[in-house]
Amino acid sequence: MTTKTSTKPAASTPALWRNRNYLLWLGSDTGSALGIALHSFAIPLIALIVTNSPAQAGVIGASGMFGRMLFTLPGGVLADRHNRRRLMLIGGMTGTAIGLGLVAAAATGSLTFWTLLTLHLLMSVRNGLFGSASDAVLKDLLPETQLGSALAANQGRDAVVSLAGGPLGGILLAISQTLAMAAIAIIHTAATVFARFMALPAPTSPDKDAGPMDRQESTGRTKWARGFAKESSEGLKWLWRRKDLRAILLVSIIVNLGTNASITSVIFALQQRGESTATIGMVSASIGIGMLLGSTVAPALIKRIPSGALTCSGLLLAIAALWILPFIEPVGAICAVLAVVLFGAPAINAGIGGYFMAAVPTALLGRATSASSLMSMAALPLAPLIAGFGFPLWGWTGLLVFCAAIATVAGIIALTNRPLRTLPGPEGWAARAAAY
C-alpha cells in the first residue's frame, strides 16, 4: 500500500510553535499524559500500602493493562469513524469523572483492593478507548514535513511528564492520598479545556462531525454496527502485511516487557524494603531525566543517523544498562542506571514513530495506531505479575536478571532483521514505505 502525502501547501503552514491548534493539542495531550502518569505512579503504591502484598498490587496493575489492551482496537475504530476532537473531549471528561471517583474513595477511606482494582480498570479502559484519537489528531493538524519535528518535541514533553510525574506523585501521596487523586481529576479537566478550543481542518464531506469511516458508512446505523468488528481488525491486518513494520512491532513487544518489568520490580522492591514514597518518586523521576537528556539530542540524531541504526544502538545501550541493574542496590546508582536505560528512547520513538506516520494512510491512522499500541502492549500485563510474584521467589538480583534477559531477546531480533536494521532517515521514509 502506498503512502498518502499531505496536500497542505508548505508556504501556508505556520511554524510549529506558532501553530495555535498544535499548541492546544499539545496542552490537551500533555494534560492527559500527566494525568495518566500520576495515576500509574500512585495506584500501585497505594495498592502496596493498602494490601502490603506485591502479588495483589501486581494483579491490580495487570488488570489495568489488560483492560487498556482490550479496548485499544475499538478505540482505533472510533478515532477513524468519528470527530477526533470530540473524542478527546469525551476522554477528558471521562478521566475527570474517574478521578473524582478516586477522590471520593480516598476521602472516605474506601481505597480497598477491590475499589482500586475497579477504578484502575475503568481508567485504563478510558485510556484504551480515547488514546488513539489524540495520536491521530496530530496528522490531521500538521503536514508530513513537520511530523518528525513534532514527534521529537513530543518525546521531550514525555520526558518532562515522566520527570515530573514521580516526584509530584510522591509528594502528593506523602501529604494526602485524597490530594493525589484530586490532582488526577484536575489535570484531566485541564486537558478537556485545551481540547475544547482546538479546531481541526474541515473534512471534505459536508458532515463536519464525521471521520473517514463515518463517510464510508453513512448508509445507516446497521451497517455501522455490522462492520465494527471487521474494522477493528483492519489495522492489525494492514500492519501484519507490512514486512517493514512487523519486526518493529515484535521488538516493541519484547523490549517493553523487559523494561517495564524491570522498572516495576524496582518500585515494588523499594517499597517492600521500606523506602518512602518521596524516594520512590525520585527513582521514577530518573527515568524522566534520562528521557529528557535523550530528547535534547534526538532531533540531531534523527537527521544524521539512519533510523534503523539509531534504533539498534539505543536498544543495545538500554540492554547493557538493564544487565547492570540486578547487581546494584544504592538508590543513587539505581537512578543513574535507569536514566541510561531510557536515554535512547526519545530518538528511537521519534524515528520509528515518524516512519510509522509517514507509512500509514490518514484514513487508517486511528486503527493502525491502536493496532500498533495493542501489539506494543501485548505482553505488558505480564510486567506487574512478573514483579509481584517474582520478587518473593527470586529476590532483587534473580528477578532483574530475568527482566534483562527478556530485553536481550529484543536486541537480537533487531540486529538480525534487515528491514529494521536498514531503515533510513526521514528523507528516505516515503520511498521505503512505498516499496512495501
Image: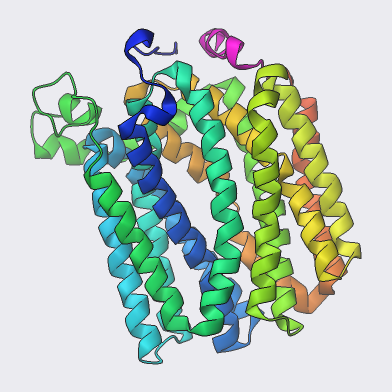
Q: Quadrant of the N terminus?
A: top left
What residue lies at 60% left-to-right and 48% top-to-bottom? 159
Q: Is residue 328 left or right of residue 253?
A: right
In this orientation, does residue 327 appear? yes
Asked whether the viewer can see residue 122, the reply is no
Q: Is residue 275 above or below residue 245?
A: below
Q: Which residues are magenta?
A: 424-436
Left or right of 282 in this view: 2: left
Residue at image coords 33%, 53%: 191
* Quadrant housing the C terminus: top right
The picture places residue 254, in percent across and down from the top left corner, at: 68, 45
Picture colour scheme: rainbow
- Pinpoint residue 263: horizontal percent, then vertical percent: 70, 61
Q: Is residue 73 magenta?
A: no
User: Where does the image place residue 162, in percent across and percent down from the top left?
Assistant: 58, 55
Residue sitting nearer the eye, 309 or 201:
201
- Give the x, y percent position of residue 115: 40, 81
Within the magenta stretch, is there residue 431?
Answer: yes
- Residue at 28% across / 61% down in the picture? 94
**Is 70 situated left or right of 395 in this image?**
left
- Residue 25 to residue 32: above or below: above
Seen from the viewer's position, the closer of residues 197 and 267 is 197
